Amino acid sequence: MNRREVLKLGSAAFAASTAGITPSHAQEADVLRIGIAAARPRHSDPNQTTQGSDNWATEQMYEQLVRPEDGRFAVTPEENIPTLATSWTQSEDALTWRFRLREGVQFHKGYGEMTSEDVVFSYQRAITGGTNTTILANVADVQPDGRYGVVIRLKSPDASFLGSTVFLNNTSIVSKKAATEMGDRFATDAVGTGPYELVRFDTNGAIIMKRHEGYWGTKARIGNVECLYIADTTARTLALLAGRIDMMEAVRAPGWVQSMLQRDRTLKMDMTAPGSFNTLHVNLTRQPFGNLKVRQALMHAINRPAVSQALAPMGGVMACLQPPGFPAGFTTEQLPPELRYPHDPRRARALLAEAGFPNGISFSANCSRREDYSSTMLIVQEQLRAAGFNMDLKIGDHTAYHADNRSDKNTLAMHSSSYPPIPTQLYQQQLAAASQVKADGSGGGNYSHYGVAMPGIDGLLDRALNTSSFRDYENICKQIELQVLRDLPLIGLSSLSFTVARRGNIDLGYEVKGGYARWRFHRATKRA
């Protein structure tokens, strides 16, 4: 197929996949269109988003009290910058935080100035009815301190409070007046303070925004942003090549980046590091995986550098559960030799024999058909086979896969999530006994039953969550990493960068190095 045919197909694919969507009539030079990897939007309320793709829009419309620099994570508390708060102080016991608010900040659609009343309201609704109540459960009280001050009191110290709680989608600041007036309609017509404001929430597959002319900071350079939902990867890819969209959420599969650059050398690839944390839960209640030697054999059977290399340039090596450069992260060379687990199929077979399985073992496991899941697990399947593990991999629907995992129906369950440089978030969700998976689906994301089927890291986790010193917090988290490498209920397979492909005439205004799977467009420019 030549380039003209590709572009023609791209136009047709884009038209078919966006049928019913009515984009704005903005001049092309003044609109930025991004192709979103989902069928349709669910929420524009930052306290209710459960679909990661919706956060591309919320990132433009809302702000928190503090945030990292664009294109970064704040690895230490000192790296957070003033946003809707101009300054803050922490008490000696790390239980009380005082924020001074920026004066004159205007909400979208004429809803007036942001004050402490809006901040208190935003936190209270996040604590009582948001999608991240586990983390926010540590907030004991939020009170106004005059018109432009807020006091937040915690139940226990949190050395990473700014990143764990303040820089969350849930704690984005919304207009109390707008939320009260709109009621249920606020879920798709919410009002924030960000550089772009909502124009239209199109349930057919688009969120349309325009520049917030009353923005407190430097106004957005491009006047309009359109998030167009195109779930089909082929349609989304061809729409970018045809010039129908300016950017797209990439297909995170082996060879995709190289294939795109062969088609169009002017394309730019923005990648976060680390991106997703791809982990592999070993179900300790499924025999023989309760046997430590079997789990050690599993580790020697999996060639983790090869997994990351197959996903290059998006893949990264994980020596433990935290990537290098994050608090508690190790490189392979920094680990004790006995916890490095180099790829060694012979050693794996010997360990299986010691465990009583000289002829290897056979088992089945479920996998999602989504590209990043299926490509990774198919690689792992081949690696395991060479070491005596015969895994019957059953690949199915992504939503059903997660539902089955939540109902304890898997033996080796791959999980992919994005985390900030706050190690305890992963430990709470994937390793804590309180998060143990349950057959009725009411449990959490600890699919290994770690801390229940065998002693876990809950004591160390409790210590980490109750220290006021960031240095102590990091040291305790390092102890957790080493214990997990000794016990092996959870394996760090690889990291996988969140990637966006953009056309060469789009300049974001900053370099993307880290952060969540969303970044702001207010500094972007577009050449004709």
Image (spheres, grey):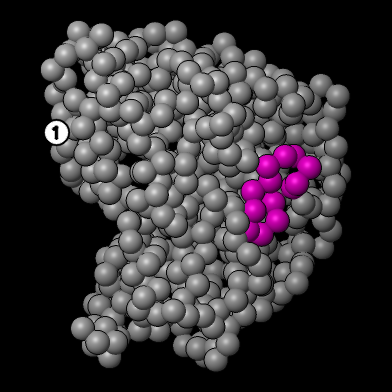
Q: Residue at x 61, y 72 (%)?
A: 508
Residue type at mark 1? Asp
Is 479 situated left or right of 402 in this image? right
Residue 368 picture location, percent across and down: 25, 44
Residue 66 vs 440, above or below: the answer is below
- Residue 245's quadrant in the figure? bottom left
Asked if residue 441 can be seen in this view, the reply is no
Q: Is 176 a magenta residue?
A: no
Q: Residue at x 52, y 47 (%)?
A: 274
Asked if residue 326 can be seen in this view, the reply is yes
- In the image, 511 versus 308, the foreground residue is 308
Range of magenta residues: 68-80
Q: Residue at x 36, y 43 (%)?
A: 306
- The image quadrant where one finds the N terminus is bottom left
- The image quadrant where one finds the C terminus is bottom right
Q: Residue at x 63, y 64 (%)?
A: 511
Residue 294 picture location, percent across and down: 28, 16
Residue 60 vs 93, above or below: the answer is below
- In the image, 70 versus 117, the foreground residue is 70
- Give the residue at mark 1: 392
Circle 1: element type = strand
Main SS, magenta residues:
loop
Residue 476 picture location, percent across and down: 64, 19
